[in-house]
Amino acid sequence: MGKRKRTFREKLRDNRELPKIVHATKEMGGKWGVEEGDTILIPAPAEVDEIMKQVPEGKVITIDMIRDILARKHGTTISCPLTTGIFASIAAHASEEERMAGAKQITPYWRTLKKDGEINPKYPGGTDAQKKLLEKEGHRFVNRGNRVFVVDYEKKLVEL
């Protein structure tokens, strides 16, 4: 028998010795705007989820804002864009698992946007589902090609 696939809730709780701080190497030069010797936070999944939980109805946050909050918290130059994004996606899917299990209080993942206010198509239900949830909170949208953005998202950013 094959190995059982872990749920997103299990993945969210698995901190795998994270958070961890690593130093940028010479080979990374310029990647993500870091230089050799800069510090990069690899956050724990639960840390990303905790910030996402703090966004109240009608407000939004971007992944870059989450990265900035985490970097400040840990005193690093940046928080890794890849892992922060992956952990936000895990938090979103774990939240949806919670909702399907009957939970009333879940992480409001739909309030976490990509750069420039773009809706994240990789969240549960894709762009349409996230758009419906944000619409209920009073947000409006604009399409740019096949991408969807929250109109005037800058005016709705949470202050954490």
Image (cartoon, helix red, strand yellow):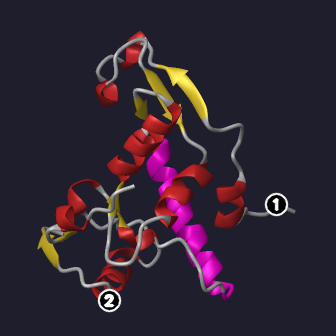
In the image, the segment drawn in magenta is 83-102
Measure how far apart labels 1 and 2 are at the Cα level: 42 Å
Give the mark nearer the N terminus: 1 vs 2. 1
Residue type at the position of mark 1: Gly
Judge the density around disc 2: few (<14), some (14-19), many (≥20) Cα neighbours within 10 Å: few
Image spot of residue 56 (x, y percent) = 41, 72
Which residue is label 1 attached to?
2
Q: Position of residue 51 (x, y in %)?
A: 49, 57
Which mark is nearer the camera, 1 or 2? 2
Residue depicted at 55% across the width and 41% down the height: 43
Q: Quadrant of residue 147?
A: bottom left
Kind of residue indicated by mark 2: Lys
Q: At x 73% / y 63%, what residue is drawn?
A: 5
Is residue 15 found left or right of 80 in the rendered image?
Answer: right
The residue located at (32%, 82%) in the rendering is 128
Residue ranking furthest to the right: 1
Residue 100 sits inside the magenta stretch: yes
> Where, by quadrant of the figure, is residue 55 drawn?
bottom left
Q: Main secondary structure of the magenta part?
A: helix
Label 2 secondary element: helix
Residue bearing the label numbered 2 = 136
SS for tag 1? loop
Would residue 123 be found to the left or right of residue 64 on screen?
right
Up/down of 40 relative to 131, above or below: above
Which quadrant of the rendered structure holds the N terminus?
bottom right
Q: Residue at x 27, y 62 (%)?
A: 157
Q: Is residue 19 magenta?
A: no
Mark 1 surroundings: few (<14), some (14-19) or many (≥20) residues within 10 A: few
